[in-house]
Amino acid sequence: MDNLTAARATMAFSLGFHIIFAAIGMTMPFLMSAAHYIYLKKGERVYLELTKMWMKGVAILFAVGAVSGTVLSFELGLLWPGFMQHAGPIIGMPFSWEGTAFFVEAVAIGLFLYGWDRMKPWVHWGTGVVVGISGFASGIFVVAANSWMNSPQGFDWVNGEALNIDPVAAMFNDAWAHQSLHMQLAAIQAVGFAVGGVHAFLYLRGRARDLNLKAMKLAMIFGAVAALLQPMSGHFAAEQVATLQPAKLAALEGHFKTQTWAPLTIGGIPDVDTQTMKWGLELPGMLSVLAHMDPAAEVIGLDQYPREDWPPVLIVHLAFQLMVAIGMLMALLAVLFFWFYKKKNFPRWFLWALAAATPLGFIAIEAGWIVTEVGRQPWIIYEIFRTKDAVTPMPGMVYHFYLFLVLYLSLAAVSIWLFARQIRITQSKIES
């Protein structure tokens, strides 16, 4: 494994691990605060038990996310010194703001954890809300840095050097809005369905049925609303990508030839050698509609770019198709949830479907992250700086890959054990 491959594999695995905990860290505090709010308003003790159970989960996952996020910050400098040399002064601002948000989140979670019976009830509730707001802000700032890599702005590139740097323009780049919206909705959707699915499973197993039914409903309200909004967010993102990164759109859609009335292909396998799509269902003109809201609009294909500038078409296309398919399935489950919620009756088959859908949102997040990152290749800074030129020249990066692989797998094992243990303790306490 050469340095570039090892560095990319290390970064991909680290980001793929951390993004799950980042999504949970952004969303779980709001679920916790919602349960706490209902308890303070209605006085139903089951919501107090639910709040405390979710609170302990927030604390566990916050700690794991802090560790994995810290490792990532070291990896940027260790693996990609060429990137940090140029990007550091430009995107330092969103990273510094992310650090500030993380500090506020850490303080707020400490106040919430240890503020029971020491603070006024609504002030204590407010600290939980601050945990969620600061976590959400932290995610937005990180996405701002990543979106700059996809739409670099706020500097002049002169003879391989960044000059006239404007960090505000860099942070609020053209890709910032659609990436932030899409990622935040994805986090709410994934966590809402995951939590709802876990509690649906526990309910079906006969464990603390009142608590688990209420928990499922509360979590699914968040997840279902996000799932119904996500297709609109995705359409907005597609329009922006068509303008800012047409090569990425062409790769994820398997669109090889520039044309008007461009078809949208559902499924299919792109054949790079023949530059055709095989076994897909074509919808004439729909890619033009998706990209430009006009069926007759021209959509740029990969034929407008040198072959060495093409993203890995097969990987990007399959990841995109998987993300979209999962998104549509979750939107259907969201519609069914609200239908059964209105009827105040959830059939067992639907609860089993929710339980089976527990990991789907996180799989979609991983697929979407592949689309974003692999779809930008071969550039680490889009059309300015190539990934191969940013990697460290130091040998032995393969050993770092195995080191971080063991680290993250250990963190995952510990997290799952702690989380499952906490659920068992809480369920047993309520049942007794």
Image: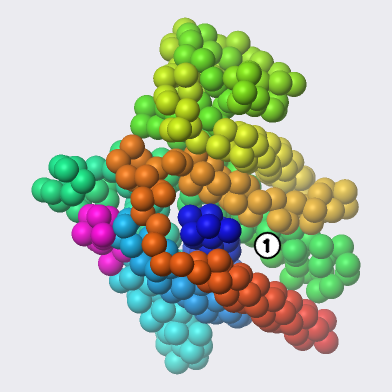
Answer whether residue 105 is magenta in the image.
no
Image quadrant holding the C terminus, namely bottom right
Q: Which residue is mark 1?
A: 195
- The relative height of residue 115 versus residue 371 in the rendered view (above or below) is below
Residue at figure coordinates x 78%, y 60% from the top left: 200
Q: Position of residue 251 (x, y in %)?
A: 53, 30
Q: Position of residue 220 (x, y in %)?
A: 66, 54
Residue 319 visible in the current orientation: yes
Q: Is residue 101 left or right of residue 42?
A: left
Q: What range is drawn magenta here? A: 85-97
Q: What colour scheme does the image use?
A: rainbow
Q: Is residue 243 left or right of residue 415?
A: left
Q: Position of residue 89 (x, y in %)?
A: 21, 59
Relative to the observer, which residue lies in front, 395 or 339?
395
Q: Quadrant of residue 266?
A: top right
Residue at figure coordinates x 38%, y 81% from the top left: 107
